[in-house]
Amino acid sequence: MTKLDIKKLNFEKMNGLIPVIIQDENTDTVLMLGFMNRDALNQTLKTKKVVFFSRTRQKIWRKGETSGNSLKVISISTDCDNDTLLIKVEPKGNTCHKGDYSCFRNTVAKNQSLQFIQNLYELIVRRKKEMPKNSYTTTLFKSGLDRILQKVGEEAMELVIAGKNKSKQRIIEECSDFIYHLFVLLAEKNISLRDIEKELISRRIVKK
């Protein structure tokens, strides 16, 4: 995360507060607008979790302290006037207090499928950590790496067969099975979707 020079920020324009735009690092969707004072910003930098100042309650509050839907800080940047912050985050759960992914509902549809994929991966990671009973995902993790790899191979082969001989719907079904088991493998090896994204982005660089 780029080092932020708090001394250059203009808190005086809004009587000690600064507006903060929250954006999903993975989908680029704007999730919400909040406000911070210096203390909230310092706590955000220290904990790497977004902390706001509530103008209604006149107190500092950490996003997710009651709902559990927190915002992990990935990067913080300022605008040209140093009076607004843009914080890119990895959201845990929905951001809006009404239960929506974003407080700006008209922005959700564009990236909804990407958010669902991210949520699926995060759910699998939670299953690995919590190991709930009667969960197929838990069974896979308990079975170990060899079983997980076996399932990835089986699903990959079924996808190939479907692609050659089956209907569009069957391909969609087999692809869904493969993606799920692939995500289990990634979670088992502690590889994030962001790690995959970075690798794909690096391959787009044209070397002269």
Image (cartoon, rainbow, N blue to C red):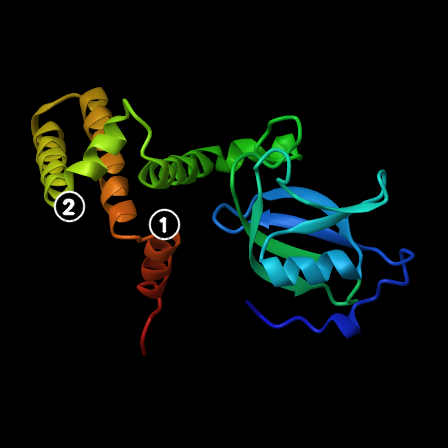
Comparing 164 with 111, the one in front is 111
Residue in the foreground of this view, choosing between 42 and 183: 42
Side of 30 where 61 appears, left or right: right
Instruction: Tell me the kind of residue under disc 1.
Output: Leu
Mark identifier at residue 79: none
Left or right: residue 28 compared with residue 142: right
Q: Earlier in the sequence, mark 2 or mark 1?
A: 2
Q: Report the mark closest to the observer, 2 or 1.
A: 2
Residue 142 % position (x, y): 20, 37
Residue at screen point 80% across, 57% down: 37
Per the image, the residue denoted by label 2 is 145
Q: Dividing the image into 4 quarters, which one contains the C terminus?
A: bottom left
Tell me how far mark 2 sits from mark 1, CA to CA. 19 Å
| Quadrant in the rendering for residue 40 | bottom right
Query: What is the x, y in percent for residue 121?
Result: 36, 40
Which of the labelled discs sits on residue 193, or is there none? Answer: 1
